[in-house]
Amino acid sequence: MRFVIIGAGRVGLRTARVVRDEGHEVSLIERDDRRIRRARNQEFTVVEGDGSREAVLEEAGVTQADAVGALTGDLNVNFTACMIASHYGCRTVMRIDEAYREGIYREYADQVDEVVYPERLGAIGAKNAMLGGTIRAIADIAPSLQVVELTITDSAPVNGYTISELQLPADATVLAFGKRDQPLGIPNADLTLEDGDRLVVLTDFDVLSEVRQLLVGETAGRADANAGTDSVTTEFDTDTDTGGVN
C-alpha cells in the first residue's frame, strides 16, 4: 500500500517507520527544516511544504495513495488535507489534540474515515487507522507480548472451526471473541469462527507469525514480515508537529 503522512514530528515519523517496516510505501510532507533533515537521514521521501495545499499533496503522491494520515499538530491543516485526500479517493485519518477531543470528534468524525488522538494511541493506533484491514494491534504488554485483534477471513485455515477446536500455539491465548458486527465478549466454546468474526489474542512475538497465518490466512512470508514490527513505544512526546502552517 502507498501512504502520504503530513507532519514529520514524532507522531508522523514514528508512524511512518511502522508502516515502512511492514513493507508499505510512504512519503512525508513537512515544512520544518530540522524535521525534514531528520526524516531524510532515515531515508524517507520528504516533500517540503504546506500539507494543506493540493499541489504539495500531489507532489507527495496523493493521486496514487491508498491513505493519507494528517498527523500534524495543526487541526486546520489536518482537516484541509483530509478533505483534499478524500477527493482523490484516499482513506483519511485526522489527528486531533487531546484538549479538543470531544468537540472536534462531534464536528468532524463524519467527514473523515478516522479521527485519532496520538497522545493516547501512539504509533500503533495511527498505523492501524491508516491500514484498516484485518489485524489491529491493541497494546504492547511487555517487550515480548502484545494484545492483537484479528478478523477471520475466508482464507483463514481455522474458518469453520468452533472455538473449542481452535488450537493456537502454546504462547498465545484467546481473550475475547465477537461475531461480525457484534460486541466482543467471553469466548463460547461452541461458537463457529466465520468470515468477519473477531478474536482478541494475547501472544508472544515468537509465535505472532503463526497466529496471523492461522486466524487471518496470511502467507508465511507476509506473516513473517509483519510479525514483530508493531512493537514500538506507545507514548508520544507532546511537541507540536508542523506539516503545514504554524
Image (cartoon, rainbow, N blue to C red):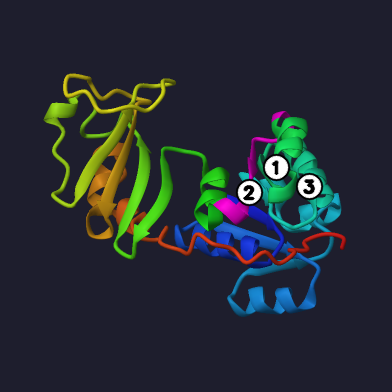
At a point 75% along the width and 64% down the height, the residue shown is 240
SS under mark 3: helix
Which mark is nearer the camera, 2 or 1? 1
How many marks overall?
3
How many angstroms separate mark 3 from mark 1 (CA)? 19 Å
Q: Position of residue 243 (x, y in %)?
A: 77, 61
**Looking at the image, which is closer to me, 220 or 211?**
211
In primary-sequence order, the first of circles 2 and 3 is 3
Q: Position of residue 5 (x, y in %)?
A: 67, 56
The answer to whether residue 65 shows anywhere in this view is: no
**Looking at the image, which is closer to me, 243 or 185?**
185
- The tag on residue 117 is 2
The residue stretch that appears in magenta? 110-120
- The tag on residue 81 is 3
Which mark is nearer the camera, 3 or 1? 1
Q: Is residue 129 above or below residue 165?
A: below
At label 3, the amino acid type is Ala
SS under mark 2: loop
On screen, residue 15 versus residue 151, left or right, reads right
* Residue identifier under label 1: 101
